[in-house]
């Protein structure tokens, strides 16, 4: 199985740094590439895209610059720009040292909001040079996201660029954190019955994010005298001269407090954007009733939630970490803020738009959480309350809720150059920009982590299998069970430098105490198929796939993964000796093809050579259910070499009979056929040519007429590139078993093991 997504990737060796280096340098180095959005194959294609055809849009734009949004990618293109002077928590790494982070930010823009993004690293620490470089990029981009620029230069740069340019300029380190934390604050105050006009707030840290936070909260209604800002030298008070600058001075207040401990006494709210350990339990005890504590220092907060709870049971707590509730994560903001700003061609991102984003996030957290979001964060009850005051990053409603609020605020505040004719239709279009498959995959991994399973890794002596088993364990997915000779397994581990074998089991099939019951079970199944008991005994002793399948069948394990040392048919044949198909289902394999413009499911790609009409109908039913489970509205096309052909040949007749079977069953999904694959995927062409076709949109499930065409198709699209192919995923067996290709990577093995674990969970529900 190919890589699934940046969020669902697993570690090859449990070594995050090593894996990251491997991932960045593998294949095409880096994380981004430029792909043409129009066909550029024929001479005419080139003539339209370049000379002489390109002259026409050039002349139109010269006459009316606003048409650049109609004829170029400007309206969906953002630049992430940095000089690398404040890279994550790593400090000044320079422009080139920060490039991997900027590429990563570009990936997040695309992943979460379908915004195309280009990273630009400007190699200067001089403010004037930086501003002079960026100011001339306005014709290229629809917006600019400044990133990882140290304070106070970031304030100067952003302000000057906003004055010079007529496109949104947004320093995410400042405003992204401010917007998401403001959303959490809105809900925390709601839960504790507070009014922003009456609270006392302390902010520790006087960098870019801290000052942006305090400015936004004041813009939302907090009286300036009710906010105290602290830095490493203590409270920023009126009259202080040491370590001051104009941005700190703007928030100086009259107060007798001089230290953080003095300032926080009696305070309602604490925002920390400083360093680990800055807040003590005694400080928390000194705060007002039901204190609101956002300890957002990364990677370690100013005070841990455990320490806060030890001091105060009535506190509402948020951090910047994903392993605690209420994560203040910038990815909840910047992709959707830019999406909304770009869609109305905003000239800036103003305070009204920021407040609208914060309020939309706060409102979304109060709404009922969809089942798919709950599943993605299995183990936590995502319901509005002290432990859920901001949405989670993989909530698919974010793009619709936040982007539309930002766009509407831009229009109302007069900075939009393109109105929204129909807000409801705009919200619907936003929801359709993202493919739900990645959300489902995230859900799968989170559910497995919350409900660890025992998974057999049948080829336990192989290096790749051992590494995959350890990654499976280290990611918290469950207990890996290696099948093999223990001395050989441990020797391979030693060669790999692996010493920690806790949470891992090794089973030697020949020496297992379970051989007799396993043999009895398999012999009962095969005794009338020409097998003697000694044949079955040998099969269980020496066949690791058979032994592993027996463990699953008899409840000694929850699922199994195999395949790297033997071809699929041999592996599947071993499994079928032990495990049958589910009643009313067909055992089959399907491939998930994740392309730029959506996901398409192919079935059957691995098991049934020439499916009968009944099998084709069953495959359609199962795939419609699988597609729906992953968040898609299933539209099933039965594919063939002809479109509704008139030739009465057996291959077409099987499809027509399958259609009649589904007609009689009155199934609850769209289906039609027979049709060619290109026709199935091009709905405009399909309706123009065959207006009677039942499909209301392009097909997303292709039921293949036979194994030859299915296997060729799935391997072909994977080899040509430009798509991610996941699978084949086995469906329809009574017990969860997955078989990888012989060339599978460690990540492929772990991902298929997780699929088997998810299958085990699904069967218990």
Image (cartoon, grey):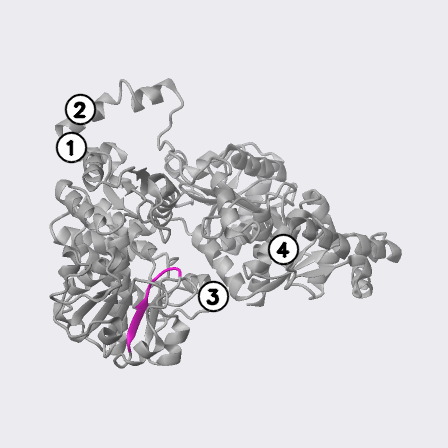
Q: From this viewpoint, is residue 385 visible?
A: no
The residue positioned 38% from the left and 77% from the top of the image is: 309
Whether 761 is among the magenta residues is: no
Please tell me which of labels 3 and 2 falls first in the chain. Answer: 2
The residue positioned 18% from the left and 72% from the top of the image is: 196
Within-10-Å neighbours for mark 4: few <14, some 14–19, many 20+ = many
Q: How many angstroms separate mark 4 from mark 1 (CA)? A: 57 Å
Q: How many marks?
A: 4
Mark 4 sits on what residue?
A: 469
Within-10-Å neighbours for mark 1: few <14, some 14–19, many 20+ = few
Q: How many angstroms separate mark 3 from mark 1 (CA)? A: 50 Å
Please tell me which of labels 3 and 1 falls first in the chain. Answer: 1
In the rendered image, residue 675, in percent from the top left (x then y), is placed at 49, 37
Mark 1 residue element:
helix
Label 4 vs label 2, nearer the camera:
4
Please tell me which of labels 4 and 1 falls first in the chain. Answer: 1
Q: Are marks 4 and 1 in contact (CB under 8 Å)?
A: no
Mark 4 residue element:
helix
In the rendered image, residue 428, in percent from the top left (x then y), is placed at 30, 52
The C terminus sits in image quarter = bottom right
Whether residue 154 sits left or right of residue 224 in the image: it is: right
Q: Nearer the viewer, residue 300 or 221?
A: 300
Please tell me which of labels 1 and 2 falls first in the chain. Answer: 2
Q: How many angstroms separate mark 1 from mark 2 (CA)? A: 10 Å
Range of magenta residues: 291-299
Mark 2 sits on what residue?
A: 59
Furthest residue to the front? 242
The disc at residue 378 is: 3
Whether 297 is among the magenta residues is: yes
């Amino acid at each position: 199985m190919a890589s699934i997504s940046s969020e669902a990737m697993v570690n090859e060796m449990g070594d995050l740094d090593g894996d990251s280096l491997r991932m960045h340098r593998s294949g095409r180095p880096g994380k981004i590439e430029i792909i043409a959005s129009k066909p550029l194959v024929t001479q005419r294609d080139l003539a339209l895209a370049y000379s002489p055809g390109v002259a026409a849009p050039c002349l139109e734009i010269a006459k009316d610059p606003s048409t650049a949004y109609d004829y170029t990618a400007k309206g969906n293109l953002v630049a992430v720009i940095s000089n690398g002077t404040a890279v994550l928590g790593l400090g000044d790494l320079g422009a080139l040292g920060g490039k991997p982070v900027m590429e990563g930010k570009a990936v997040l823009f695309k992943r979460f909001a379908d915004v195309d993004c280009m990273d630009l690293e400007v190699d200067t620490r001089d403010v004037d040079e930086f501003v002079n470089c960026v100011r001339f990029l306005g014709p290229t981009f629809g917006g600019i996201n400044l990133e990882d620029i140290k304070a106070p230069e970031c304030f100067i740069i952003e302000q000057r660029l906003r004055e010079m340019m007529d496109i949104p300029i947004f320093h995410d380190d400042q405003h992204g954190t401010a917007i998401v934390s403001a959303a959490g604050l809105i809900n925390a105050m709601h839960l504790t019955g507070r009014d922003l006009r009456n609270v006392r707030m302390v902010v520790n840290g006087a960098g870019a994010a801290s000052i942006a936070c305090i400015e936004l909260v004041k813009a939302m209604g907090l009286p300036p005298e009710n906010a105290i800002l602290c830095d490493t030298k203590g409270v920023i008070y009126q009259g202080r001269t040491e370590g001051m600058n104009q941005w700190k001075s703007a928030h100086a207040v009259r107060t007798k407090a001089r230290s953080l401990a003095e300032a926080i006494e009696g305070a309602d709210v604490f925002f920390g954007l400083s360093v680990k350990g800055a807040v003590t339990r005694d400080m928390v005890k000194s705060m007002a009733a039901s204190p609101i504590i956002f300890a957002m220092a990364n990677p370690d907060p100013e005070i841990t939630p455990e320490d806060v709870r030890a001091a105060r049971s009535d506190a509402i707590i948020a951090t910047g970490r994903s392993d605690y509730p209420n994560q203040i994560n910038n990815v909840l903001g910047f992709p959707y803020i830019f999406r909304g700003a770009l869609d109305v061609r905003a000239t800036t991102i103003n305070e009204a738009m920021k407040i609208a984003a914060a309020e939309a996030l706060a409102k979304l957290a109060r709404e009922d959480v969809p089942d798919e979001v709950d599943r993605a964060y299995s183990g936590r009850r995502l319901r509005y309350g002290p432990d859920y005051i901001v949405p989670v990053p993989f909530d698919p409603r974010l793009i619709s809720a936040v982007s539309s609020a930002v766009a509407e605020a831009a229009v109302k505040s007069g900075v939009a150059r393109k109105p929204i004719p129909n807000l409801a239709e705009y919200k619907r279009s936003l929801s359709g920009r993202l493919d739900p498959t990645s959300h489902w995959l995230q859900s799968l991994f989170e559910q497995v982590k919350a409900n660890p399973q025992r998974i057999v890794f049948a080829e336990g002596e192989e290096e790749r299998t051992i590494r995959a088993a350890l990654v499976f364990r280290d990611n918290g997915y469950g207990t890996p069970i290696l099948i093999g000779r223990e001395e050989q397994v441990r020797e391979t581990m030693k060669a790999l430098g692996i010493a920690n074998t806790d949470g891992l089991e090794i089973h030697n099939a020949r020496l297992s105490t379970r051989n007799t019951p396993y043999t009895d079970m398999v012999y009962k199944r095969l005794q009338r198929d020409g097998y003697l008991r000694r044949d079955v005994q040998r099969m269980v002793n020496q066949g690791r796939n058979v032994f592993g399948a027996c463990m699953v069948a008899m409840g000694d394990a929850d699922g199994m993964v195999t395949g790297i040392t033997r071809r699929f048919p041999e592996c599947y044949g071993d499994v079928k000796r032990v495990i049958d198909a589910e009643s009313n289902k067909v055992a089959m394999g399907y491939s998930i093809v994740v392309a730029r413009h959506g996901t398409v499911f192919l079935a059957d790609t691995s098991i049934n050579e020439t499916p009968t009409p009944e099998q084709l109908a069953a495959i359609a039913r199962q795939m419609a259910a699988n597609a729906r489970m992953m968040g898609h509205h299933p539209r099933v096309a039965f594919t063939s070499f002809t479109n509704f052909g008139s030739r009465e040949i057996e291959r077409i007749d099987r499809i027509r009979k399958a259609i009649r079977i589904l007609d009689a069953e009155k199934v609850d999904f769209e289906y039609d056929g027979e049709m060619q694959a290109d026709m199935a995927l091009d709905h405009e062409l399909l309706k123009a040519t065959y207006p009677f076709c039942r499909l209301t949109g392009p097909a997303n499930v292709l039921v293949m007429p036979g194994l030859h065409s299915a296997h060729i198709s799935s391997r072909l699209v994977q080899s040509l590139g430009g798509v991610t192919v996941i699978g084949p995923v086995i469906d329809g067996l009574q017990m969860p078993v997955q078989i990888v290709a012989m060339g599978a990577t460690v990540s492929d093995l772990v991902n298929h093991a997780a699929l088997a674990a998810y299958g085990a969970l699904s069967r218990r529900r």
